[in-house]
Image: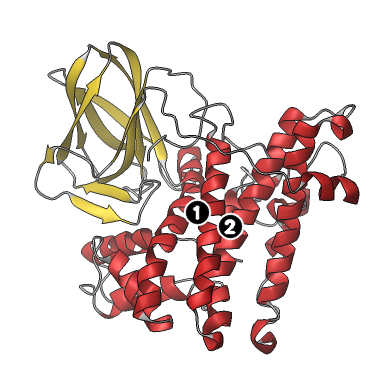
Amino acid sequence: WLCTTQPGLVCSEMQTAYTCGANRLWLVTIHDPKVAAYQLNLFMDMAWDIRTVTPTTVQLHLQNWLGVQFDKQVAARLIKPLITFYRLSGIRRPEFMGWNEAPKAGVNPIFSNENKVNNTDFSAEEFGNELERYLNDYDSLSLSVLKLEDVIPDNLKGSYFAMVEYPIMSSAAMATKILQAQEARHIGRIASFHHDREALEPAARSVMAYRKLKWLISVYNTINEQKWRGLMDMQPRNLPVFDAPLLPDTLSEKEIETYSHQKPITAAFENDKCIVRSGSDFLNGTRGWEELNMLGHSMNSVKIKKGGFITYQFNAEEGTAELRLALIPTHGRLGVPMALSVSIDDSEPDTLQITNALGTETWKQGVLRGQIIVKHGIQLSAGTHYWVVRALNEPIVIDQWMIDYNKDRRFYIFPQR
């Protein structure tokens, strides 16, 4: 299928392993070395010499790798689209778009209720329609890599499709299939579905995205004289997330043709007075903090060592609000909850605990989302404020933080540009 693991995550985890004493032997599990070509290359380079790549040079490492695969000029033009791809797939991996869990060992996924496709947490109502904006970003990304194909030499076009176009366009199609089907289910009713243009348009786009996934897999398995025939599967492990979209009713071919060509909604960005920052956008901190690029929803996370703290500054309106802190899921000591403290201005620090041991619901949802969300109620006066976060018993990695005056808001993506 795909390898969407963010380079920053590979780099950060291997550096942590080395620092903690795992400096003689590393093991990596991959489904196919070609599909995970870059991540495997990064892993091997760090295994050979841990100093080769750091969390702040991993982007340059990716660009240099692209230069080897194509050339330096192409790599310079490709690096920005690849960064966008890892950001979008980091927000939600395409195989996790079903908003479900993998079936338990020994359970056929076809008969697992845990594994059925559910509605996502993406909202069409919040922040100027975050659902459509996510799809807009994927559409723009797909167009940019298609345009770059013109500068790829003919003898490398197959590799370009496999390494760049296929993962990006398949991820975009999966997101479109799932999210547009969700919109069709939300709007449409079985009795009136075939007379409801507003429901038929997202339904048709969802069906076309599913067909595009089939087409992309067919191309992958036949390019370069079928060199990679059979490498891509339309339905890995028979997981329902790869099924045809779940719609209020079956569309006719005429309906698909009529409604699939309608332009998708262009969603303008809104933050509704929320304050949102990347983890690395801080004022000051203790020695030992480390910036982690190409990691998290923000792609600019920061790691705080045990006992360390960092300070953020912001301007606020008066009111009751909620501080939401998005942490990268990391392993702590077995059975010991991760602890951190938060203080606003001169207030006494409040200690927050996160039970994130392997297998807990917090850990599972954190891995699916790519973030563990910690919430803390605060009272603000109008003006400039400072807040401090301290890692008490384990290092923590901050991806994003957000102050929202609507604590009951239901949404998925922190509204950050």
Circle number at residue 171: 2
In the rendering, at what x and y percent does residue 138 appear? 54, 52
In the rendering, at what x and y percent does residue 125 appear? 57, 26
Mark before the other along the chain sequence, 1 or 2: 1
Q: Would you identify the image quadrant in which residue 312 lies?
A: top left
Local packing at callout 1 (Cα closer than 10 Å; few below 14, some 14-19, many 20+) is many
Local packing at callout 2 (Cα closer than 10 Å; few below 14, some 14-19, many 20+) is many
CB atoms of marks 1 and 2 within 8 Å: yes
Q: Is residue 356 left or right of residue 158?
A: left
Q: Is residue 103 visible?
A: yes
Asked whether 39 or 21 is in front, the reply is 39
Q: Distance between the Cα atoms at labels 1 and 2?
A: 7 Å
Q: Is residue 411 left or right of residue 393?
A: right
Judging by the rendered image, the residue that carries numbered circle 1 is 89
| Residue kind at label 1, given as amino acid type | Ser
* Helix, strand or loop under label 1: helix
| Residue 251 sits above or below residue 130 on the image | below
In the rendering, at what x and y percent does residue 127 appear? 48, 29
| Residue kind at label 2, given as amino acid type | Ser
Circle number at residue 410: none
Residue lying at 70% horizontally and 54% vertically, measured from the top left? 209
Residue lying at 62% horizontally and 61% vertically, measured from the top left? 170
Picture quarter with the C terminus: top left
Asked whether 173 or 240 is in front, the reply is 173
In the rendering, at what x and y percent does residue 171 appear? 58, 57
